[in-house]
Image: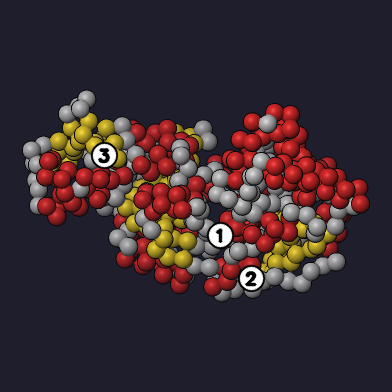
Amino acid sequence: MIKVVFDNGTLLWSGSDMPQLAAADPAHFKFDERVTAFRSRGCDYAALVQKIRELQLDFDDHACAFAPLEELQLAQNVIPRPHQQTAFEAWRRAGYRGVAALPTGSGKTILAVMAIARLKRPTLVLVPTIDLLTQWAGVLETFFQQEIGMWGGGSNTTCNITVSTYNSAVLKMEFYGNKFAFLVADECHHLPGAVNQMAAQWSIAPYRLGLSATPESDAGRDEVLTDLMGPVCCRVQIDELSSGILSDYEVETIPLELSGAEQAQYLANRKIYTDFLHRHRVVMNSVHAWRNFILEVVKNGPEGRKAFEAYLAQKALARGGGAKLDMVWRLLVRHAGERIIIFTADNATAYEIGRSYLLPVLTHHTKSGERKNMLENFRTGACPVLVSSKVLNEGVDVPEANIGIIVSGGASVREHVQRLGRILRAKPGKKAVLYELVNVGTSELNVLNRRREHRAYTSKLGSDLC
């Protein structure tokens, strides 16, 4: 006989047959002398139960605290689009455990609704932001016509279907990790973070679905995501979806130049920074480049501080400049009356644009009430332009937006696919345009080339505008 109990996010295994199970699957177990029992992660529950069945051992399960929701029904029919049905079938064939990589705006939430309706099990949905928390709760309440629990944003209710921010789930899963059979992780590329992953590790949910437009990161994080949610079972690209599912779009790069004074400042600071790298043999395209640079900065006192300040100065000049500010105005005039989102890499630039043209600015400092009003005014057209650093990269449903202006950004492919996704939600007659403003003669060109390593860009790049 084998007995298992849930213990603060882990599982305790005991009984006369435990030596046989531990020998058959030693990687999952560690003997805990404090309680004279074997311990495993909560997330290993399904694999270990399957192993017990294979070995035909007697099993006394005191960990599982969920049961089928026999009366769970959809309040309205879901007619999946072909890509949603394809993703659902791929996830089903993967044993109801895997990651679906679907473009932003293609209906990932509907895929989760289909999965919940199929499994009829208590479900926990993990999301990264308060905006997504309320959006998911609203959609699920509409489809299932029952109260939806919420953890986060001042809410603390638990129901058969509950939506939680990652942060709130980490705080609660050691107590609730055995209450849900189905775990959905939206924007699951956040899950492998050192803290966020605990929300999935402490859950015994045997059924798991990860959702993200761009799930991949580095090898280590990808391995964690596969371990916690399953492999990528389906991948749909933006350019594979027909018009009507996502808007038609084009990407247009606008090359600009720094002024003479700005270019001189850029080159002077760039030289201080690169000379420091060469003197201390720091290679910035290596895996640990940033860490090595910071270590040298700390070790070299005043020289290091000067190099770091020069790095920040040249980066700010590459990302900004008067020409970009002027071009933003020209694009605002060109697309007057349309719904425009202006993206920047930092708050300072966002606030500068806001002050210059009297535009609302959304950053992580914006209070929730003000943020809600800004988004509502944007959706109704009362204020058709929003400026944001990174707050609007993901998790905000603004189908009215059709023009994106990237003033500055990082080299991350994910960031730019997400920014593109903000303007691709389909609407009749809509044509989306994403402008990228780039200062030639600076490091921004390298950043631009790296972030374009995605097929969504390759076939949609328009002509340059002078």
Amino acid of disc 3: Ser
Q: Secondary structure at mark 3?
A: strand
Q: Which mark is residue 458?
A: 2
Q: Of discs 2 and 1, which sits in the foreground?
A: 2
Please state which of residues 320 and 286 is positioned toward the viewer in this rendering.
286
- Mark 3 burial class by Cα count in 10 Å: few <14, some 14-19, many 20+: many
Q: Of discs 3 and 1, which sits in the foreground?
A: 3
User: What percent of the width, then of the height, locates residue 200?
Assistant: 38, 43
- From the viewer's perspective, tell me whether residue 409 is left or right of residue 42: right
Q: Residue at x 79, y 63 (%)?
A: 254
Location of the N terminus by quadrant is: top left
Amino acid of disc 1: Thr
User: Which numbered disc flags the more N-terminal residue, 3 or 1?
Assistant: 3
Q: Residue at x 91, y 47 (%)?
A: 261
Q: Secondary structure at mark 2?
A: helix
- From the viewer's perspective, tell me whether residue 330 is left or right of residue 403: right
- Label 3 with label 1: CB-CB less than 8 Å: no
Q: Is residue 47 visible?
A: yes
Q: Which mark is residue 40?
A: 3
Location of the C terminus by quadrant is: bottom right
Q: Which residue is mark 1?
A: 104
Q: Which mark is residue 202?
A: none
Q: Quadrant of residue 248?
A: bottom right
Q: Residue at x 17, y 29 (%)?
A: 36
- Mark 1 burial class by Cα count in 10 Å: few <14, some 14-19, many 20+: many
User: What percent of the width, then of the height, locates residue 406?
Assistant: 72, 56
Q: Residue at x 39, y 33 (%)?
A: 172
Q: Quadrant of residue 348?
A: top right
Q: Secondary structure at mark 1?
A: loop
**From mark 2 to mark 3, how far is it between C-alphas?**
46 Å
